[in-house]
Image (spheres, rainbow, N blue to C red):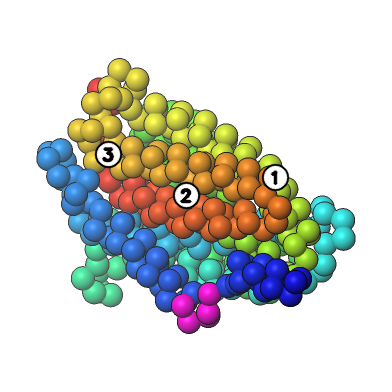
């Protein structure tokens, strides 16, 4: 009588085949890429705002850069959490950091080439003024991101976490400074908010992805559930920080008196509203996963909503990339 029960339990947690999983991931990646690539035109429709040249491509490159940044940050974060749990096996899933560094390097190089042509899409190699990157603040920040991903690739094989953390940190600092040029109102405050926002978002996205990979690679359900529970507690703090910094950044660019109008009448506001809705959905999925983790007979039942949360977070990253390529609202 017990054998069928074990079979039923095994069936409930059976994983899809490798081919099916790879096909599903490929479809999700393509769909996520369509958001920044095709998003500028619908977002700008009827607003009277002009679309910057190559906005879709720039948004896609920025999305890839954000995703590549999240992978090593998440791995470092979850490995640190795992070391805090007693009895955690030393085995870890194969690191994706070297691949993420290579992808991020290509994305950063593409964005640097745009900066080198005066924020225009280069028609050829001859249009790219590499030397000009050293003459502008935006160019130097673009070069910093390129070099940081290059360094991340060399550091990925290192077993010293203290060494691996510096290249992603440099990318986050560069992005925070790039998003708030000196001509902006209180740029240092804006850069500080973006720094915290991007750091917490990278920890959340990359951390959840690696935590689920770690759960899948282990047969010990108890240890895996403990790790997911510890991550969930830290993720609640990360969500609070992301929400607070996101609200403050939005209010700096869209004062309360104009917020309602700009959320519907500007491309930036429309995409920001979509991002808020997606983040709310992610928060609901995270809450569902935490409830199932506490109450379900098998704690690994929480993996289903957690996987859905990863997919939704991928959409948030894509929307965030699109947001960076749209014109910033005018302070009325």
The span from disc 3 to disc 1 (Cα, nearest Å) is 37 Å
For the residues bearing labels 1 and 2, Cβ distance under 8 angstroms = no
Q: Nearer the viewer, residue 192 or 63?
A: 63
Q: Nearer the viewer, residue 225 or 111?
A: 225
Residue 143 percent coordinates (x, y) = 46, 61
* Residue hosting label 2: 175
Q: Quadrant of the C terminus?
A: top left
Give the mark toward the camera: 1 or 2.
1
Compared with 99, 40 (above or below) is above
**Mark earlier in primary sequence (3, 1):** 3
In the rendered structure, which segment of residues is drawn in magenta? 16-20
Q: Which mark is residue 294?
A: 1
The span from disc 1 to disc 2 (Cα, nearest Å) is 38 Å
Residue 100 percent coordinates (x, y) = 53, 68
* Secondary element type, mark 2: helix
Give the mark toward the camera: 2 or 3.
3
Q: Quadrant of residue 168?
A: bottom right
The span from disc 2 to disc 3 (Cα, nearest Å) is 22 Å
Question: How would you classify the magenta stretch by its main secondary structure?
Answer: helix
* Secondary element type, mark 3: helix
């Amino acid at each position: 009588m017990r054998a069928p029960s074990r079979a039923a339990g095994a069936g409930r947690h059976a994983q899809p085949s490798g081919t099916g999983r790879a096909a599903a991931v490929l479809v999700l990646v393509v769909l996520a890429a369509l958001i920044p690539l095709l998003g500028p035109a619908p977002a700008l429709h009827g607003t009277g705002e002009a679309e910057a040249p190559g906005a879709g491509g720039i948004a896609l490159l920025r999305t890839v850069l954000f995703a590549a940044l999240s992978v090593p940050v998440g791995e470092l974060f979850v490995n640190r959490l795992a070391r805090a749990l007693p009895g955690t096996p030393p085995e870890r899933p194969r690191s994706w950091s070297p691949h993420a560094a290579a992808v991020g390097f290509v994305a950063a190089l593409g964005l640097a080439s745009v900066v080198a042509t005066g924020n225009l899409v280069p028609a050829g190699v001859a249009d790219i003024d590499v030397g000009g990157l050293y003459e502008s603040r935006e160019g130097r920040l673009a070069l910093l991101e390129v070099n940081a991903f290059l360094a991340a690739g060399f550091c990925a094989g290192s077993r010293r976490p203290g060494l691996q953390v510096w290249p992603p940190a440099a990318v986050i600092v560069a992005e925070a400074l790039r998003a708030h040029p000196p001509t902006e109102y209180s740029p240092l405050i804006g850069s500080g908010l973006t720094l915290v926002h991007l750091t917490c978002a990278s920890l959340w996205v990359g951390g959840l992805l690696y935590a689920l990979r770690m759960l899948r690679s282990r047969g010990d359900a108890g240890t895996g559930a403990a790790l997911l529970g510890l991550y969930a507690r830290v993720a609640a703090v990360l969500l609070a920080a992301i929400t607070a910094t996101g609200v403050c950044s939005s209010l700096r660019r869209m004062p309360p008196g104009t917020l309602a109008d700009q959320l519907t009448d500007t491309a930036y506001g429309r995409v920001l509203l979509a991002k808020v809705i997606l983040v709310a959905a992610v928060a609901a999925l995270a809450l569902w996963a935490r409830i199932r983790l506490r109450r379900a007979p098998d704690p690994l039942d929480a993996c289903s909503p957690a996987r859905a949360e990863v997919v939704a977070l991928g959409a948030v990253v894509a929307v965030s990339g699109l947001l960076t390529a749209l014109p910033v609202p005018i302070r009325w």
